[in-house]
Amino acid sequence: MNEKLHVPGFLAGGVSCGVKKNGAKDLALISCPSGATAAGVFTTNQVKAPPVLLARERARRAVARAIVANSGCANAFTGEKGMADARSVTQRVAEVLGVAEREVLPASTGVIGGPLAVADIGRAIPGLVAGLSPGGWQDAAEAIMTTDTHPKLASRWGRLPEGHIRIVGIAKGAGMIEPHMATLLVFLATNARVEAPLLREMLREACNASFNRITIDGCMSTNDSAIVLASGTACRGAIRKGSPSAARFSAMLLEVCRELAERVVADGEGATKTVKIRVGGGRSEKEACVAAYAVANSMLVKTAIGAADPNWGRIVQALGASRAKLNPERLLLRIGEASIVRRGCYAGEAEEEKARKVMRRPAYEIRIDLGMGRGESEVLTCDLTEEYVRINASYRS
Amino acid sequence: MNEKLHVPGFLAGGVSCGVKKNGAKDLALISCPSGATAAGVFTTNQVKAPPVLLARERARRAVARAIVANSGCANAFTGEKGMADARSVTQRVAEVLGVAEREVLPASTGVIGGPLAVADIGRAIPGLVAGLSPGGWQDAAEAIMTTDTHPKLASRWGRLPEGHIRIVGIAKGAGMIEPHMATLLVFLATNARVEAPLLREMLREACNASFNRITIDGCMSTNDSAIVLASGTACRGAIRKGSPSAARFSAMLLEVCRELAERVVADGEGATKTVKIRVGGGRSEKEACVAAYAVANSMLVKTAIGAADPNWGRIVQALGASRAKLNPERLLLRIGEASIVRRGCYAGEAEEEKARKVMRRPAYEIRIDLGMGRGESEVLTCDLTEEYVRINASYRS
């Protein structure tokens, strides 16, 4: 067992139950027998999947004891039957774990529109529960994968006055990724004791600075959910709002979220490169963010990134077409250490050649100054490759 | 000579001048020796190419006598030198044609950022002028192509009290296509006599209902320009605002623009299918349009279209993530004649199978009802294929 991937008081596991036709793991369970404070942020898509609605409602309650998540089927746009199915899965988990149904939070990810294979899931739950272990996070992370090529885990440890705090997180990503005030699927567990309102605030802040600043294809899922469970078991006291411990715990939570978010982008469908788009000089932070997303989601920019082609005209085009105001005469554009555009002027082929070298790296930054003000923001994106099209042309078939 | 591609009073032509490295035609000229009323609509990208700024200024004047357009280089984001280059090209054309420089409107399309090969263009102008002919529209249409696989021409004839009216139009498209209040490159010529304000109004309306309702990759170019020249030569009088002739002429102009717009989408980079996204039931026309663009620009929807996969969950996802309000319980979704979602409920596999057959056609409609009101709109889109990525990964290299 990897000691880093272990939070006292939590058990995790993942098995194959048959929702995915290829026999891969597709059912994950995280259990906190002593009960945990829960906080969640969920998709802002107007079409919210039944498991999202149920998890959101239950995350507001005082105590949660489990998260059950399946991949292979999103149970989205499935109406009343979808809600009954989500309830039925959590009810079965509750029975086997011996907890209350309302203490079990559901999540689903996969194809939108098809019905959940409730019977298959139900049959797998006893075995899943029997196999739960403190070191089962790897299996759980595998079981929530869809087109991800590898599981995503991250953890942090810290020694606070309130105790030795640990945070473990798992996430899945790969496609339909442009979270807004929510994310893909992310489950976080900590042994810290944090009251629900503070935990919610911290989770929201961490998501805003991590999962809400990434994009793979500009598509926001119907099932995005990020949930943190805080057991409080290892603590000598609660972490109080405004305390130095709250600041440290927030920073740890953000680090785990950022690490997971970066892994999600690096493993984007067909992606071979991870590029941070940093925009400064906006009239406001919001406009800088709009400009960053305009570049990060441009199919032409993303294709150029994939080809390691410093086709900076496409970046200028994307900026100019965005709702963010820019001053063409003061525009700055850097690709890694290459200054392609300085004060609105193209810097010449030598810089472009330098940029071409930067673009062959697996990860780098594109820095932009809009020349309007002091607003700053950044977004993490990946390249668009033929492989993305291949994956999504065959994903359901 | 194709008689349909001929407007009395206009000459056209296209040659290879060396801007494109492969020897393809890259310089087009349209000439109206007797002078024409001009109207234009241009890109709303904040970064406007020098030829766009110059053409916009000159289109406001009373008389235009020529349009000169090169492909292979957009002369965009080239600052003062770019403006001097655009002027120099129009000056040379004016000299050889024997007209005033301000009567020549420039346009450029191609890669953003590089300098215009003014000397090459200048050397080619005398030969281009010498070869102008009434039937030269095909050559002109070829000379404005970038990644287009074929030239795009359309024409209409009509017998009006004011004379036998003809309209010929040429366009180029292929990539960086999501026009807003403007288009790719479109040049239209007519022998009708129409005062400039009315001509502008008619062009704007025609563009709004044609070029401004298409998308290939959601990217708005820095060089979009649509220009119409009306010579008035074949007319027994001017077409007056509000007259039946104005309505008929407007309809003809719209038909030419729609036909060109449809050809542009059908020839989108890597595209194999043309799909009209028709949205009804919006709270307003604007929201219906927002919803239509959300579906039309979704990379996941476009990939599913390419694979002929009725993955309707992706359409629901795109609608739900858009700013257009929808009622999930009243949502309708049809792919061709297949009713996939009725009043918010999935209609089953038989309808999905029907949709799969529709999606194998080269062109079809996706109809959506948001269930909120009476707002309607439509957008024409194409599929996303591996070929799009291949083209744009190698376009500059």
Image (cartoon, coloured by chain):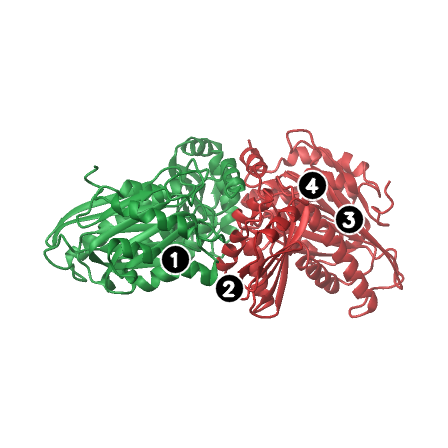
Chain colours: A green, B red
Assess whether mark 3 and mark 4 are in contact (beta carbons under 8 angstroms): no
Q: Are marks 2 and 1 on the same chain?
A: no
Q: Are marks 1 and 3 on the same chain?
A: no
Task: Judge depth for marks 2 and 3 and give the one in front.
Answer: 2
Residue B48 in the image: x percent, y percent? 57, 50
Is B150 left or right of B234, judged from the image as shown? left
Q: Which mark is residue B144?
A: 4
Q: Are marks 1 and 4 on the same chain?
A: no
Q: Earlier in the sequence, mark 2 or mark 3?
A: 3
Which chain does tag 4 point to? Answer: B
Question: Is residue A169 at least partly visible in the picture?
Answer: yes
Q: CA distance from mark 1 to mark 4?
A: 57 Å
Is B75 left or right of A180, judged from the image as shown? right
Residue B58 in the image: x percent, y percent? 68, 54
- Residue at image x 22%, y 43%? A133
| Circle 2 residue | B328
Which chain does tag 2 point to? Answer: B
Is A103 left or right of B85, judged from the image as shown? left
Task: Judge depth for marks 4 and 3 and give the one in front.
Answer: 3
Q: CA distance from mark 4 to mark 3?
A: 15 Å
| Secondary element type, mark 1 | helix
Question: Is residue B63 at least partly visible in the picture?
Answer: no
Assess whether mark 3 and mark 2 are in contact (beta carbons under 8 angstroms): no
| Circle 1 residue | A86
